Amino acid sequence: MTWKDFSLKRYRKYILPLIILVLVTYGAAMVCGISYGELGRGLVSGVVFLGHMFPPDWSAFNEMLEPAFQSIIIAFLGTFFGALLSLIMALLAAANISNPWVRNITRFLIGVERSLPEIVILLLLVAAFGLGSMPGIIALAISCIGMLGKLLADSIEEIDHIMIESMQSVGAKKIQVIFFGVLPQILPNLISYTLFRFELNIRLSVILGAVGAGGVGYELDYAFNMLEYHRAFTAMLIILVMVFSTEQLSYFLRKWIKVDAALK
């Protein structure tokens, strides 16, 4: 293909959307007061600031291990209890096994929770329980409901209805239908979604730790406040290893679950 073969007619259906996108982006930048000159200067200043953080303070590495383990435990417990709560909410929010009124109310509550950021939930819990790991665990558990509750409820509504109707026709009670008809069909999705949520909670535990939940996030925030940039860089490296390792482990487990389910 040469320049002689190039024709705007082939791309004219993309030109108008592109112009609209550029105008909307420019307008949004003007409303937000974004200055591209300040953006460039800020990037340069950021690179200079990163230079002040080298080399990392390796002497603080051992001190960071316990807070890092604490962050992992916060994420694990938050995910575990959150998955249990989400499963209960999902069963109440599924149209094929729940009362319409109960389903609508539960779906509304799931939507309300999804609209609340985790930090807002944590601040409310800190006011109730004080600083520490407990508010962080509860905040992560509650925040799981908005995501896992909706995904699991949708999975329940998509399962084979013939099995459920067959069990109900022979007199199976609702609890029997749930344990022997619903849970076996959604178990692979439950595990896969929970592992994916655990990845997110590892990151969120760092953010929540910086605002009062403890863990390595608190150590990072404390180091920045005390202008100990080399120590802060050590905390950042540990966080990077935590997140990367968790993602790889979760990816391997989810892939193994899918392969195992396909073989069955």
Image: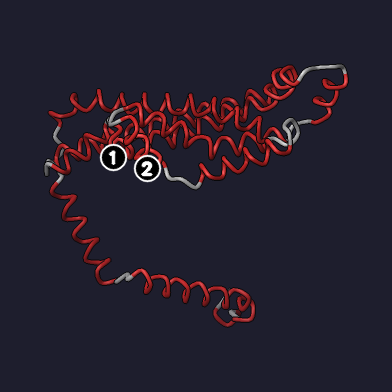
Q: Are marks 1 and 2 in contact (CB under 8 Å)?
A: yes
User: Looking at the picture, how far across and down is residue 155, in whole percent?
Assistant: 67, 35
**Number of numbered discs present?**
2
Residue 165 as seen in the image, left or right of residue 148: right
Residue drawn at (45%, 28%), measured in percent from left and top? 249
| Quarter containing the C terminus | top right
User: Looking at the picture, how far across and down is residue 180, in whole percent?
Assistant: 73, 18
User: Looking at the picture, how far across and down is residue 156, in whole percent?
Assistant: 69, 32
Q: Amino acid at mark 2?
A: Ile
Q: Earlier in the sequence, mark 1 or mark 2?
A: 2
Residue drawn at (58%, 79%), measured in percent from left and top? 6
Front-most of residues 53 and 207: 207
| Disc 2: CA contacts within 10 A as few (<14), some (14-19) or many (>=20) | some
Residue 81 as seen in the image, left or right of residue 155: left
Numbered label attached to residue 22: none
Q: CA distance from mark 1 to mark 2?
A: 8 Å
Q: Amino acid at mark 1?
A: Val
Secondary structure of residue under mark 1: helix
User: Looking at the picture, how far across and down is residue 138, in whole percent?
Assistant: 41, 30
Secondary structure of residue under mark 2: helix
Task: Find residue 5 and report its image quarter.
Answer: bottom right
Which residue is tagged 1? 211
Front-most of residues 57 and 104: 104
Which residue is tagged 2? 119
Compared with 36, 51 (above or below) is above
Front-most of residues 247 and 122: 122
Front-most of residues 193 and 125: 125
Task: Find residue 16 and report its image quarter.
Answer: bottom right
| Disc 1: CA contacts within 10 A as few (<14), some (14-19) or many (>=20) | some
